[in-house]
Amino acid sequence: MIRLGLMGGTFNPPHNGHLHAAACAREDLRLDKVLFIPTNLPPHKQLPEGSATTAQRCEMVRLLTENLPWAELSAIEIERGGASYTVDTLRQLAAPDRQLFLIIGTDMLLSFDKVWREPESICRLCTLVAYARGIGEQRLLEEKKRVLEQEFEADIRVMARAPVPVSSTGVRGGGDLDRLVPPAVAAYIRKHQLYDRKNGK
Ligand code: ATP
């Protein structure tokens, strides 16, 4: 059985928080591989003005994963086109010799039953692995886990790890690139002057 982790996101840009959650999940759940899956059109989020293009978001994810033997970019949602629904991706990736683990942060677990398409089907297709994005979120995650396990018979693992409180919004807003994203992604953002970065900032 292959234990496959999936980390979906807009990755606008990918950052150390994504990397942290994926690396922890790999260790915590003994995953063989983690796929980073950039959305084509995110259903729950408008990409703000000045965002990276889809090709640029993909390239940054490729750079983030290129030296990690256990991580890989998957363009499955971009190749599928249209709005990206996780349930469709899980159906496409499901296979008898694979166990799927969907890696998500606090915001996504808390909104899971409200905004995701077919949450019950998602729960049948995978195990949810949740990480706190900020300090003090652990209890919220544990409470939500109980609710969702009752509602959907979901298999949810809330992992206790010190959070890495980084967001793409913070990076786009001018945060210190060298602290927030891996070096290869920082270099790409600077080179292409993404998110209004000027003068190598
Ligand atoms: P934005 O600030 O543009 O809303 P984001 O930082 O939330 O972006 P996404 O690409 O939307 O990043 O997130 C993809 C997935 O990664 C989501 O499940 C999200 O909860 C999770 N995630 C994002 N940042 C972190 C973090 N710092 N720690 C753990 N999980 C995270």
Image (spheres, rainbow, N blue to C red):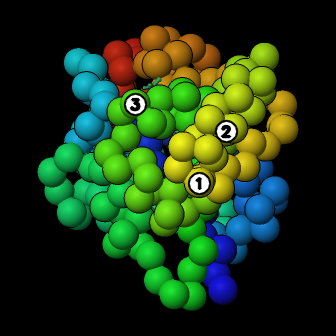
Q: Looking at the image, do the residues carrying marks 1 and 2 touch, with CB atoms under 8 Å apart? A: no
User: Is residue 106 toward the left or the right of residue 124 in the image?
Assistant: right
Q: Is 50 drawn above or below residue 37 in the view shown?
A: above
What residue does disc 1 label? 153
What residue does disc 3 label? 114
Q: Position of residue 41 (x, y in %)?
A: 23, 42
Residue at image point 23% right, 18% down: 49
Q: Toward the viewer: 97 or 16? A: 97
Q: Earlier in the sequence, mark 1 or mark 2?
A: 2
Q: Is residue 1 visible?
A: yes
The three-letter amino acid code for the residue at tag 2 is Lys
The three-letter amino acid code for the residue at tag 3 is Lys
Q: Secondary structure at mark 3?
A: helix
The three-letter amino acid code for the residue at tag 1 is Glu
Q: Toward the viewer: 113 or 185? A: 113
In the picture, the quarter occupied by the N terminus is: bottom right
What residue does disc 2 label? 145
Q: Position of residue 72 (x, y in %)?
A: 53, 65
User: Is residue 127 toward the left or the right of residue 174 in the image?
Assistant: right
Mark 1 is surrounded, within 10 Å at the Cα level, by few (under 14), some (14 to 19) or many (20 or more) other residues, namely: few
Q: Toward the viewer: 113 or 88? A: 113
Mark 2 is surrounded, within 10 Å at the Cα level, by few (under 14), some (14 to 19) or many (20 or more) other residues, namely: many
Q: Position of residue 111 (x, y in %)?
A: 47, 29
Which of discs 1 and 2 lies nearer the camera? The answer is 1
Q: Secondary structure at mark 2?
A: helix
Q: Is 64 drawn above or below residue 74 in the view shown?
A: above
